[in-house]
Amino acid sequence: MSDTQAIKQKILELKKEKNALILAHYYQPLEVQDVADHVCDSFEMAKLARGAAQSIVVICGVVFMGESAKILNPDKKILIPVADAGCPMADMVTPEDVIRLRKEHPDAAVVCYVNSSAAVKAVSDICCTSSSVLKVVRSLKERKIIFIPDKNLGSYVAKMVPEKEFILFNGFCPAHNRISESDVLAAKSAHPGSVFAAHPECREEVLRHADFIGSTSQILEYARSSSAEAVIIGTEEGVLERLRKELPDKKIFSVAPNFICRNMKKTGLTELYNCLINEQTEVTLAPEEIAAAKSSLDRMVSI
């Protein structure tokens, strides 16, 4: 048995012994995805954490995902393998930013992308993910929407829901935002006949060339069901790796080299094993912070 197989086996044994549920994001390394109970995007992760029967939930992702799981499950022990696996986009917006925008636009609803801190969720009206955002925005009675923190996702939604007025915050995902129109054109030129599936965290100039725009889970489903023999993937390379494993007869390409979220790659098998054996790092939030943030997440999950 190889070292990798041995540690995987230990993780599976610990998971059973500790009555733990392991949830991994699609951007996690494949070896981590292999031992997870579910591999999902942030929306599915929120729903699965909320309904988990297990007493311990391990979130293989970044900090805001662990916080969301804790908000929805305050009585469960929520663990995250790497304490400093943050999200640069989430760090771009503060509660003070939201409060200022509310004062400037008192008739607007605040829609908060789930890639945000618990403190920001606490001063927002409703959360959304890239897969639920259109439903969320269309469900609101308010005509004016303050959208935080991702300007690219917000711009995409504004075009899809023209009957609403959007105030966009100037945040972005560094990994998705660095992809340019020239990257797309180069990929299409290198792989003629390919279809291009892009994440809405990409810039408008990139989305303009997409054959499909959707969340990570929606991109996966599109690639699986598409009749095209080749697909260019416009999101983090974890999705690319998973599709290449699942679809060996289909050609899967990245829109650009090194399309990586470095925080997502901090979690490996060793980190996950240590997390389970030591039951750390536990996500902790003050009861008043949980209570304040829960409303916006509950509204999202219910929709």
Image (tube, rainbow, N blue to C red):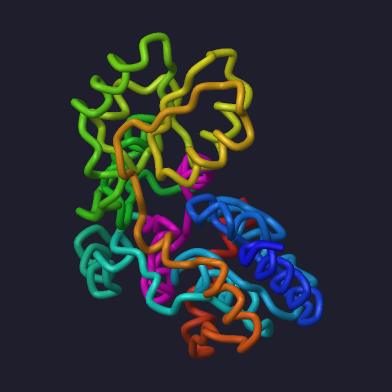
Q: In the image, what residue occupies the spot 47% across and 59% down? A: 126
Residue 237, horizontal then vertical, whole percent: 42, 43
In which image quadrant can residue 245 be found? top right
Residue 21, horizontal then vertical, whole percent: 71, 69
| Residue lying farthest to the top in this orientation | 193
Q: In the image, what residue occupies the spot 37% across and 44% down? A: 143
Considering depth in this image, is 239 or 141 the residue closer to the camera?
A: 239
Residue 66, horizontal then vertical, whole percent: 52, 72
Asked if the magenta segment contains residue 262, the reply would be no
Residue 12, horizontal then vertical, whole percent: 75, 69
Q: In the image, what residue occupies the spot 51% across and 34% down? A: 219
Asked if 257 appears above or below 63 in the picture, the reply is above
Left or right of 107 in this view: 42: right
Which span of residues is magenta-colored? 109-137
Image quadrant containing the N terminus: bottom right
Considering depth in this image, is 260 or 2 the residue closer to the camera?
A: 2
Left or right of 289 in this view: 282: right
Asked if 52 appears above or below 44 in the picture, the reply is below
Considering depth in this image, is 71 or 276 the residue closer to the camera?
A: 276
In which image quadrant can residue 278 be found? bottom right
Q: How many marks?
A: 0
Asked if the magenta segment contains residue 129, the reply would be yes
| Residue lying farthest to the front in this orientation | 1
Asked if 213 appears above or below 81 in the picture, the reply is above
Q: In the image, what residue occupies the spot 30% across and 38% down? A: 257
